Image: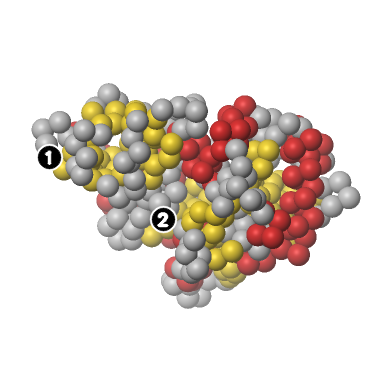
């Protein structure tokens, strides 16, 4: 394991003699707690708990917070209802992504949630064009502990510990208090499909984790490592900025329509988004590929179409437990986007994958 990777604040609670660690955008996280197949099954059928305290969390305060973000981000940021959440992107002048985030309304603040790769720069990017506006951005990443509970039985765990489901009453964010425990924010994040992210003060993180672990396991669920979640994430077509998306990506290439608003007024990159939407399509498309018997599949490998021309590159991949298949997210040229298209690894021409629809129920 690379010594430059940062450790999770609660790494001492995640010791596993069999699982080891893996790197996720600069952080060392548990790869598995010993049974990757069982962890994956809990994601699909039960409840699986992950420590995701590496997430980027920025709080926006001040009376101009909505107006300022509305002028900077790709999604409408005005008239938030309490508990509402919206996906948004920060774009450059030609429509390429500088950041991908979710914005949630919480009292007198907006809470911005983003992948860990954005922790260093997100606040400074948001601060860049603040002049006379009364808005303040505070990086709260180090102050918070964050855990994800994923799977169809997550609601049972929520009920046991006394927290409301954030999906209730069409909301994506709720505040509550664990029975005899800390105050907790529970939110429904697109980074973790089918899951709930819990956030609490860092000094209460161990207490919350132990309570969640106890109730998850008592309910038949399990702790989950990143290897199982990565397969689940890719299968559900949930791209992460810094892994599948970067500063060369236009949101339309990844079908991030939920991050775009087409008639809210001007914002950086709007002209590109409007032109592509009204006059044609992007030059590339993020797709899901499925390979059989493919140990050679790895991130950043080139893809070749049936005519022998290089047409794309793998962004992320993972083996599906108990299946002889590997799923991958790849950025390919537009003509290769259709489900059923066969693509090969340029380096290993005999290794072929079939394009599938990006988002399915798994």
Q: Give SS at disc 1.
A: loop
Residue 223 appears anywhere in the view? yes
Residue 119: tell me if it is visible.
Answer: no
Query: Which residue is depicted at the point 86% across and 46% down?
Result: 179
Q: Which of the 4 image quadrants contains residue 162?
A: top right
Q: Which residue is mark 2?
A: 242
Side of 247 where 4 appears, left or right = right
Residue under label 1:
309
Q: Is residue 311 left or right of residue 95?
A: left
Left or right: residue 282 compared with residue 177: left
Spot occupied by residue 87 in the image (x, y as percentages of width and height): 50, 47
Tell me residue 177's x, y (percent): 81, 49
Q: Residue at x 24, y 27 (%)?
A: 341
Q: Mark 2 touching mark 1, by CB under 8 A?
A: no
Display coloring: secondary structure
- Residue pictured at 27% horizontal, 47% vertical: 301
Question: Dot 2 lies on which element?
Answer: loop
Q: CA distance from mark 2 to mark 1?
A: 26 Å
Q: Position of residue 43 (x, y in %)?
A: 59, 34
């Amino acid at each position: 394991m690379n010594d430059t990777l940062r450790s999770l604040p609660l790494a001492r609670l995640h010791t596993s003699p069999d699982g080891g660690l893996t790197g996720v955008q600069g952080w060392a996280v548990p790869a598995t707690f010993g049974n990757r197949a069982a962890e994956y099954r809990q994601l699909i059928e039960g409840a699986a708990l992950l420590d995701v305290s590496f997430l980027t969390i920025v709080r926006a305060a001040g009376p101009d917070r909505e107006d300022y973000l509305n002028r900077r981000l790709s999604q409408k940021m005005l008239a938030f209802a309490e508990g509402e959440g919206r996906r948004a992107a920060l774009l450059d002048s030609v429509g390429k992504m500088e950041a991908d985030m979710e914005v949630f309304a919480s009292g007198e603040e907006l809470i911005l949630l983003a992948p860990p790769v954005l922790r260093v720069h997100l606040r400074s990017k948001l601060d860049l064009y603040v002049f006379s506006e009364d808005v303040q951005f505070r990086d709260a990443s180090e102050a918070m502990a964050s855990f994800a509970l994923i799977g169809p039985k997550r609601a049972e765990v929520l009920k046991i510990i006394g927290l409301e489901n954030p999906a209730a009453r069409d909301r994506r964010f709720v505040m509550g208090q664990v029975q005899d425990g800390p105050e907790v924010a529970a939110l429904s994040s697109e980074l973790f499909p089918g899951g709930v992210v819990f956030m609490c003060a860092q000094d209460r993180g161990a207490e919350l984790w132990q309570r969640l672990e106890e109730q998850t396991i008592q309910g038949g669920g399990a702790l989950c490592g990143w290897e199982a979640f990565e397969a689940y994430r890719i299968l559900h077509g949930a791209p992460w900025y810094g892994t599948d998306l970067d500063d060369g990506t236009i949101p339309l290439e990844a079908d991030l329509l939920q991050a775009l608003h087409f008639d809210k007024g001007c914002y950086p990159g709007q002209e590109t988004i409007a032109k592509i939407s009204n006059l044609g399509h992007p030059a590339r498309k993020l797709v899901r590929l499925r390979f059989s018997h493919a140990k050679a599949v790895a991130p950043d490998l080139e893809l070749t179409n049936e005519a022998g021309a290089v047409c794309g590159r793998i962004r992320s991949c993972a083996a599906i437990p108990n299946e002889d298949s590997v799923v991958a997210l790849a950025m390919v040229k537009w003509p290769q986007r259709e489900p059923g298209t066969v693509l090969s690894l340029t380096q290993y021409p005999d290794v072929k994958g079939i394009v599938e629809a990006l988002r399915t129920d798994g």
